[in-house]
Amino acid sequence: MKEGIHPNYREVLFVDLSNGFKFVTRSCVNTKEMGKTDDGRDLPLFKLDTSSESHPFYTGTQKSVDNMGGRVEKFRNRFGKTGGAASK
């Protein structure tokens, strides 16, 4: 490999700020902070707003648009095309 043209690919500690979930993976992301893993290693730290541990889609807490108390049906009734006025 040529020197100086490749990004710094190394192990990075990612921390989910919403629930404190930590995981280590290899990444090229730029970091300014260091963090300590559960096994005591000091690694570059990258803070996340959400991860698979806190995202509603992956945790099963996401609400379906159709199950929102009839709001979709009210919108369709109010703004939906009736067919009579649009065909003229």
Image (tube, rainbow, N blue to C red):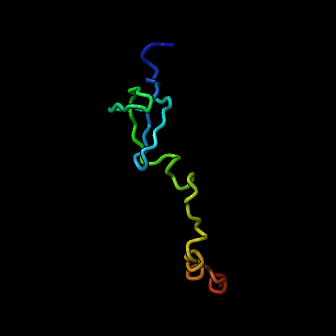
Residue 33 location (% of width, % of height): 33, 33
Residue 48 location (% of width, % of height): 42, 43
Give the answer, above or below, for where 14 lies relative to 50: above
Residue 59 location (% of width, % of height): 56, 53
Residue at left offset 58%, top offset 67%: 65
Residue at left offset 58%, top offset 77%: 70
Give the answer, above or below, for where 84 lies relative to 65: below
Give the residue at the far top of this rendering. Answer: 2
Q: Quadrant of residue 45?
A: top left
Residue at left offset 42%, top offset 16%: 4
Residues 4 and 20: in front is: 20
Residue at left offset 59%, top offset 71%: 67
Give the answer, above or below, for where 40 lies relative to 69: above
Residues 6 and 51: in front is: 51
Give the answer, above or below, for where 29 lies relative to 53: above
- Can you say which quadrant of the picture contains the C terminus? bottom right
